[in-house]
Image (tube, rainbow, N blue to C red):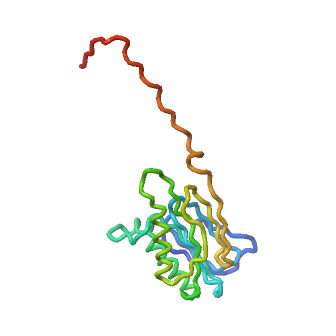
Amino acid sequence: MSLTSLSPASAPSDRLRINLIQGEAQVDDRPNVVFTTLLGSCIAACIRDPGAGVGGMNHFLLPGDGMGSSSTSMQSYGLYLMELLVNGLLKKGARKHALEAKLFGGARTMVGLSDIGAKNASFAKRFLELEGISYVGGSLGGTQGRRIEFWPVSGRARQILMEPSDKAMPKIMAPPPVAAPASGGDLELF
């Protein structure tokens, strides 16, 4: 997917919800627009220029640049989607020095595996720092998924935490132990 830029044409007065999925970035300057997404270990960067009245959101799966990957898998990488979002904002009139960001996601959703959520969060914060974009808040880490809503013009953001995965997943019961044979009988293998 690529960046979708929506213009302020004749927008209805009621709220317009735009859902982002992994690998997408969107920019808008209409006050009735709210971007939404669901996150686990993924990150959503919500960036806006308050003076220009434009903002956007992305949703990426992995940090890094995706070098050597196909163009479709590259769309899940943080570097690609962060640059896509910032460039989309600049095209809509945002000024780079005035950008402010909120970051969400980066949960540790799988115990025992690499903490990709922490790597994603670290990448996103480092990107903002290197690009001179103010980090003004958000919510990173933890073990719960999140639903995020972001109003790109006002900068308002809302996070709704999902049930922890240990409560959402049924407990797997261990099978009952197998009783040993009563006598030391013969064993025959075929």
User: Which image quadrant for residue 73?
Assistant: bottom left
| Left or right: 172, with 54 as reference point | left
Find residue 6 and report its horizontal and vertical position in percent.
60, 77
| Left or right: 34, with 81 as reference point | right
| Residue closest to the far left | 190
In this rendering, is residue 26 above or below 117?
below
Find residue 183 and report its horizontal and vertical position in percent.
34, 11
Q: Residue at x 32, y 69 (%)?
A: 68
Q: Residue at x 44, y 74 (%)?
A: 80
Find residue 113 and report its horizontal and vertical position in percent.
42, 53
Quarter occupied by the C terminus: top left
Depth order, front residue of 65/177:
177
Q: How many marks?
A: 0
Find residue 165 and report its horizontal and vertical position in percent.
56, 49
Q: Residue at x 72, y 70 (%)?
A: 15
Q: Residue at x 41, y 66 (%)?
A: 72
In this rendering, is residue 97 above or below 21?
below
| Left or right: 54, with 141 as reference point | right
